[in-house]
Image (cartoon, coloured by chain):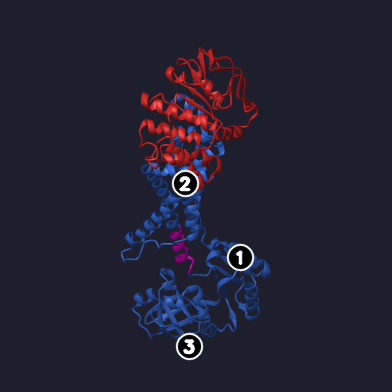
Amino acid sequence: MSKILELRNVNKIYGTEIKNQVLYDINLSFEEGSFNSIIGQSGSGKSTLLNIIGTLDKATSGDVYIEGRDIKKMSINQLADYRNKTIGFVFQFHYLLPEFTALENVLMPYRIQNGKVSKEIVRKAEEIMNLVGLEKVKNNMATKMSGGQQQRTAIARALINNPRIILADEPTGNLDSDSTETIYELLRNINEEYKTTFLIITHDRRIAEKADRIVEIKDGKINLDIKK
Amino acid sequence: MKLGFRIALRFLKSNKGQTLLIILGIAIGVSVQIFIGSLIQGLQKGLIDKTIGTSSQITISSQDGNLNTKDYEEFIEVIRKEDREMEAISVALDNAALMDYKENSQSLLVRGFELNVADGIYDIFDRIVEGTYPKNDNEIILGIDLKEEYDMALQEEVTINTAEQKVHSFKVVGFFDFKVSSLNTGWGITTLQTAQNIFATGDVISSIELQLKEDSVFLADEIAENIKKDINREDIKIVNWKEQNESLLSGLQGQSISSYMIQVFVMISVVLGIASVLAITVIQKSKQIGILKAMGIRNVSSSYIFLFEGLILGFFGAILGIVLGLGLSFAFTKFALNPDGTPVIDLYINYSFIMISGIIALLASAFAAMIPAAKSSRLNPIDIIRNN
């Protein structure tokens, strides 16, 4: 399988006067269609790593290649388009737009890309929402849903543009264990069905163990890298 | 862009109270602008109507005495060829005389007009409050003030003594009221024919009087200068209302300037108001902007959101402001009344001024939205994602 993601000697230092190095010479690559988990204590740098891969943050030094392209050489607009088409984000906090309904939130990445929404895409959004069990609340405002429903809406939103990579930062961080289980089942199914590459940050070891590969980050360095 | 508009609309709808408050703020600014602007324009128009609206605005006369037929017909020809059309062109023969009525004597400026034409300048027919206008020889109309002073009545005889010691008997056929006491006591109006007869001048006049169209009243000096150039004669004197009424003119200009100042400051406060509120909305919505950017919205599109917010607010603010401003103006003419029940200031609705005020408010709103738009464009999504 080909490498969809590659990090070479990635360092991240915050601050200019008081320097705080978060990542030290990270070298990592991920294969297309793989289901990876990243674990580590809070403050270990795993979220920073995910944000750099997602092009939300910039590495202080080192290179990030996505689908073989060096993201340093991409313009701001190219990066925005790349985030829109290639990556689906699921954050620990759902980050839905409270002014819009669940369905509208799911359709938002598509709207950003295409402006108009066709009937087919609405149907597709509804299918995805059915898949994650949101058929009853799809027209609720984002704020009028339970935490689990909001998080599932965020997952549906991440899927709408058929991204090749899904980056999830503790997607079940504030959910109960039953919902957590359901959501992981869901992600795993999507991985198998669409061959979407998953990078999931979690500190739930039970969940991490279900992944194809576990990467542990400790103090900004790779401490463990287990492939099954 | 469409997405920007959609999101802007949704943001505004989701916070109805705040949106209404901003719209109201803009509307009040616009309404004050329209109210003050209309008021001052109405005031100026009223003032111009009252002072120079019924008098000669450009007067052409000879330095030494009268103009003969050949001359004045030529001049009128020249005036008609001017770029700007005249409201009225009238000729007058003016002579000083002494009027005797019973035991009283009164100095009088006897003005001979072609009344149908002179009406275009002086509104003579409307000014006659009693009786009729002079149609036949030796008929005269006098001011209402003379009537009251000497207790005169219609159809009575008065005698006019000319400077050449000739005495003519006149019949008073009417009384006029020009609302100016010096005219109401000092003028006697008769036909041009009669004036030419009694002063034995033959076919001459003393002046050509012009009234300008309303939109060129303030160009009187330029027009007068053009006429002077075209007539091109040293012995001809041309005066315009602007040089005769310098204090009125400076008063009007002062009023205009103060009106512009008020309007500019109202506009500045509206712009600052919108800009500050929108600046706060960017902060309120920074999380949403961060999310949208993480999802791949481009910086330009994210700045459109606030630009559209500004435009939407400006649009509704302007419309509401125009309605309020007109309402305020109408109310003013209904409540601010003279003792006789007429409005203190006549309402003057200048549609183009109102349109321009509305458009300025719209542009000001868009301009005020630039800062938040730029801010939104610069917002980095990682700051939002990391700081939650």
Mark 1 → mark 2, Cα distance in angstroms: 35 Å
- Please name the amino acid that badge 3 sits on: Asn
Residue to which mark 2 is pinned = B267
Q: Which residues are magenta?
A: B41-53
Residue B237, percent across and down? 61, 68
Question: Which residue is painted at 48% across and 49% down in the image?
Answer: B361
Secondary structure of residue under mark 3:
loop
Residue A225, percent across and down? 54, 14
Q: Nearer the viewer, mark 1 or mark 3?
A: 1
| The N terminus of chain B: image quadrant | top right
* Residue A110 as seen in the image, left or right of residue A131: right
- Residue B283 lies, with reference to residue B369, above or below; the image says above
Question: Which residue is painted at 41% across and 49% down in the image?
Answer: B27
Mark 2 → mark 3, Cα distance in angstroms: 60 Å
Say few, some or many: other residues with alpha carbon within 10 Å of mark 1 (under 14 / 14 to 19 / 20 or more).
Answer: many
Residue to which mark 3 is pinned = B136
Of B303 and A31, the residue lying toward us: A31
What chain does mark 1 sit on? Answer: B
- Residue A85 lies, with reference to residue B178, above or below; the image says above
Residue B222, percent across and down? 61, 62
- Please name the amino acid that badge 1 sits on: Ile
Q: Quadrant of residue B157?
A: bottom left
Report the chain shown in red. A
What chain does mark 3 sit on? Answer: B
Rendering colour (chain B): blue
Secondary structure of residue under mark 2:
helix
Residue to which mark 1 is pinned = B223
| Lower sequence index among marks 1 and 2 | 1
